[in-house]
Image: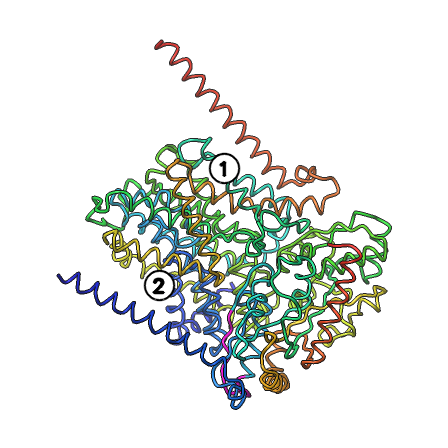
């Protein structure tokens, strides 16, 4: 319990008026960054780093990590209310969250997301406190082969999960994979699908694709409909009805687990955590057909997972000095700027610093919950703004968000192009979510496969020789076989049924 | 009625904002012409510094720390503008095409800056000649790194083992087309080796893989592995600088280890060609003073930056040396 004593000292440091103020500032800014589409935690943290130069290290890092986990809370809000993901990790929340809002249950969705985020965040910080070092060591064993199999497993869970038709889901997923190929081949450096545009050398940015496919297409397709839609007048209570408590709670617990584990694994991201959680919720649900029509688990699980991920992802940074996602890499830069070296010696060399930051994360998560529960009501009023006023604002915010990523007008053009594609996909009922998820996973799968093959003496066989990877691949096989079996049986039953009626 | 009123106010504000922004730009354009006046009392307003990599990255950190100290001597602030993308090519292109009024400069990363035009030819819209070097601050050498418990004690151990067991050693590197890839290519050719080269995105994942035993050895930049080196989790076998450096005093150079090659990543400052040479001299003097300032020295030490000052002429010569060297390498066989 030595850590406990240190943590208490950390609280003493984090609760000094100055540090408390910066914690409050960090989570507030984080929440706004999360709400604004395109402006994700990466951009938010990067933009504020220069502002912290004049500060001491402790308030600076408290502020910057507050932005990081605060953004995970904020991202939910726009996903639920206007079907535009505030940041990458909330893409999946659009599916059921927006449906809930349409049914007048925006309050429930926001409420359960805030509670889940709080639980996920606190559990992750607890494990950072007590289990950090030993967990991080275990996660290091995770090499490219394991990573490849894990991503493949994730992708398989997702295919056919979204949308009504499996074929259409597959088409969208394959387009996503193709878009992921744009850029440089990770193994040979060969240029692919650049069409002479140097801007494409680094690949298509996730934010550009997400804002175009979701944000712009949503605006386009809504404007052609009746601009004065019948909108629910009441936001409703924040606490979901008692009948949904158990389902929500279980989803929150599972989400915490998934986010926590993935946070430790290098190369993952909060988006992957949230979409893995969504797939799991749908798999374990007794009534999977409710998903896509406003299932509360579809909001509770993923929103918990991305917060729990945000906390857990700090473990490898604090204990090993290794950033395992882009946001964390920015945070690492901030540590270095302030003369702190994250890594094995941080706990020994700067204990007052590390425990103050950990304590501030408890405080920050609590602040976010307190802020979110009452504020959700006011946020939800966004849904009551007439479209003709709301859409131009969203459009502007989306474009500013996209521009802020690389400060490039090219990205804005690309976003508009993806907006048009997203609109067509809506018309053809191709699920955009399947496209974007396979885009995210496709890049990572390819890279992991190239790494696996480059380092393997037995070619592709190594995937089956390493226990974790082999287990995951076996699960993939089972899912495929089961999927095939049920499809065939359903067809057969349909065939019998039509036979009888005929 | 009330609603209409609000709409009017909002539109009026917007129009005013746009008009103001437009005026600002006109003013900036007007400054460009008068040459003689531009030098007297230069700089008169903050200078923009383009960084071709994201905020919080290695280059950004160097830029912000030197420029912050340099403000003391220029009496004007610097505004860092991060323009990342296409491995730096976007930012370098922006710098090459920037106004030559003395108020836009940028960070030059070598050999990245040198390599892109050689490899990609016309697709890159800048040439090395488009830049005038001002000063170099950091020379970050490449390093071969193994886990603390690795059987390789020296670079020679690794080379001998790789020679005896072709295609068995797994080495992590930054991916094709990087200066690391070129160093490895040379290592393989001169020693007739076959190494399994595993690409990584960034040093972090590489270190994880090294400690998790998924790779046997890795090549990275000296400044990026210091924490793990300090904690004795890894050992540095050899370093790519001309001479040994203070940060890793006991680590022999590639040359000492029997690999005749220099592999360094440089971070310096440059201006677009066509900027007034007297303005460049003003900045070069300010940068030299900032480099010698104890405040910057202290900061650099905290950041584990391998410092290496070069004035405008030396930096230019070094960039040209790299250009000649890599062009010859590319002529031998493209990568």
The chain identifier of the residue carrying mark 2 reads: A
Neighbours of disc 1 within 10 Å: few (<14), some (14-19), many (20+)? many
Q: Earlier in the sequence, mark 1 or mark 2?
A: 1
Is residue B74 on the magenta stretch? yes
Neighbours of disc 2 within 10 Å: few (<14), some (14-19), many (20+)? some
- The residue under label 2 is A367
Real-space Cα separation, disc 1 to disc 2, in angstroms: 35 Å
The answer to whether residue B274 is above or below residue B85 is: below
Q: Residue furthest front?
A: B33
Is residue A342 on the magenta stretch? no
Q: Choose between B320 and A340: the one closer to the eye.
A: B320
Q: Choose between A491 and A7: the one closer to the eye.
A: A491
Q: Secondary structure beneath disc 2? A: helix
Q: Are marks 1 and 2 in contact (CB under 8 Å)?
A: no
Q: Choose between B179 and B271: the one closer to the eye.
A: B271
The chain identifier of the residue carrying mark 1 reads: A
Q: Residue at x 72, y 60 (%)?
A: B180
Q: Is residue A298 visible?
A: yes
Instruction: Establish whether labels 1 and 2 are both on one chain.
Output: yes
Q: Which residues are magenta?
A: B71-81
Q: Image quadrant for the C terminus of chain A?
A: top left
The numbered mark at residue A157 is 1
Coordinates of residue B30 in the picture (x, y in percent): 45, 79
**Side of A123 where B71 appears, left or right:** right
Coordinates of residue B311 in the picture (x, y in percent): 68, 82
The answer to whether residue A142 is above or below residue B125 is: above
Coordinates of residue B50 in the picture (x, y in percent): 54, 71
Q: Quadrant of residue B116?
A: bottom right
Q: Is residue B294 visible?
A: no
């Amino acid at each position: 319990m030595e850590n406990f004593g240190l943590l208490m000292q950390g609280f003493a440091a984090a609760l000094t008026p100055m540090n408390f103020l910066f914690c409050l500032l960090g989570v507030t800014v984080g929440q706004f960054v999360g709400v604004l589409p395109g402006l994700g935690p990466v951009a938010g943290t990067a933009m504020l780093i220069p502002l912290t130069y004049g500060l001491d290290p402790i308030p600076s890092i408290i502020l910057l990590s507050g932005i990081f986990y605060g953004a995970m809370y904020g991202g939910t809000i726009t996903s639920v209310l206007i079907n535009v993901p505030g940041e990458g990790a909330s893409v999946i929340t659009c599916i059921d969250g927006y449906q809930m809002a349409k049914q007048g249950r925006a309050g429930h969705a926001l409420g359960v997301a805030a509670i889940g985020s709080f639980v996920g965040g606190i559990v992750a910080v607890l494990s950072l406190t007590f289990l950090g070092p030993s967990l991080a060591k275990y996660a290091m064993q995770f090499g490219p082969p394991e990573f490849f199999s894990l991503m493949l497993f994730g992708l398989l869970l997702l295919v056919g999960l979204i949308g009504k038709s499996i074929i259409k889901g597959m088409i969208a997923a394959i387009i996503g994979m193709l878009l992921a190929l744009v850029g440089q081949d990770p193994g040979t450096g060969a240029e692919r699908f650049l069409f002479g545009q140097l801007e494409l050398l680094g690949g298509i940015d996730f934010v550009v694709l997400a804002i175009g496919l979701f944000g712009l297409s949503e605006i386009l397709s809504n404007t052609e409909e009746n601009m004065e839609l019948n909108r629910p007048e009441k936001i409703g209570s924040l606490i979901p009805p008692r009948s949904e408590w158990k389902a929500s709670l279980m989803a929150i617990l599972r989400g915490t687990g998934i986010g926590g584990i993935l946070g430790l694994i290098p190369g993952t991201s909060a988006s992957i955590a949230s979409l893995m959680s969504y797939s799991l919720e749908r798999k374990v649900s007794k009534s999977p057909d409710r998903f896509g029509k406003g299932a509360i688990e579809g909001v509770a699980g993923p929103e918990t997972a991305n917060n729990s991920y945000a906390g857990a992802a700090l473990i490898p940074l604090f204990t090993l000095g290794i950033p395992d996602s882009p946001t964390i890499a920015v945070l690492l830069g901030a540590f270095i700027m302030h003369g702190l070296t994250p890594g094995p010696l941080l706990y020994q060399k700067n204990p007052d610093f590390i425990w103050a930051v950990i304590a501030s994360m408890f405080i920050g998560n609590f602040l976010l919950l307190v802020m979110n529960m009452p504020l959700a009501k006011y946020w939800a009023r966004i849904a009551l703004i007439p479209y003709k006023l709301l859409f131009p604002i969203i459009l502007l915010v989306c474009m500013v968000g996209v521009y802020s990523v690389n400060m490039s007008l090219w990205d804005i053009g690309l976003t508009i192009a993806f907006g048009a594609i997203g609109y067509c996909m809506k018309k053809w009922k191709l699920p955009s979510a399947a496209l974007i998820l396979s885009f995210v996973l496709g890049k990572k799968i390819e890279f992991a496969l190239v790494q696996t093959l480059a380092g393997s003496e037995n070619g592709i066989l190594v995937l089956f020789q390493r226990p974790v990877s082999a287990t995951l691949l076996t699960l993939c096989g089972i899912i495929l076989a089961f999927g095939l079996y049920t499809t065939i049986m359903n067809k057969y039953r349909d065939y019998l049924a039509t036979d009888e009626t005929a | 009625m009330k609603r209409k009123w609000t709409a009017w106010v909002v539109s009026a504000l917007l129009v005013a904002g746009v008009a103001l922004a437009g005026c600002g730009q006109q003013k900036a354009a007007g400054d460009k012409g008068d040459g003689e006046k531009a030098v007297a009392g230069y700089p008169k307003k903050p200078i923009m510094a383009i960084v071709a990599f994201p905020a919080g990255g290695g280059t950004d950190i160097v830029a912000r720390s030197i420029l912050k100290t340099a403000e003391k001597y220029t009496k004007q602030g610097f505004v860092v503008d991060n323009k990342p993308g296409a491995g730096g090519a976007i930012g370098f292109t922006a710098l090459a095409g920037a106004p030559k009024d003395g108020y836009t400069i940028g960070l030059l990363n070598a050999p990245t800056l040198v390599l892109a035009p050689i490899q990609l030819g016309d697709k890159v819209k800048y040439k090395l000649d488009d830049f005038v070097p001002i000063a170099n601050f950091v020379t970050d050498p490449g390093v071969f790194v193994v886990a603390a418990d690795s059987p390789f004690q020296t670079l020679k151990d690794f080379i001998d083992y790789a020679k005896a067991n072709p295609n068995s050693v797994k080495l992590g590197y930054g991916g094709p087309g990087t200066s690391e890839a070129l160093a490895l290519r040379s290592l393989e050719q001169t020693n007739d080796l076959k190494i399994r080269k595993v690409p990584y995105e960034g040093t972090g994942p590489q270190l994880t893989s090294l400690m998790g035993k998924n790779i046997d050895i890795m090549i990275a930049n000296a400044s990026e592995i210091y924490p793990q080196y300090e904690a004795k989790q890894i050992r540095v076998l050899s370093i790519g600088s001309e001479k040994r450096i203070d940060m890793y005093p006991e680590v022999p150079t590639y040359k000492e280890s029997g690999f005749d090659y220099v592999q360094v990543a440089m971070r310096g400052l440059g201006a677009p060609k066509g900027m007034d040479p007297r303005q460049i001299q003003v900045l070069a003097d300010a940068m030299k003073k900032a480099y010698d300032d104890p405040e910057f020295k202290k900061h650099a030490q905290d950041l584990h930056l391998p410092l290496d000052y070069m004035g405008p002429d030396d930096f230019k010569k070094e960039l040209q040396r790299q250009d000649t060297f890599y062009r010859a390498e590319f002529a031998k066989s493209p990568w």
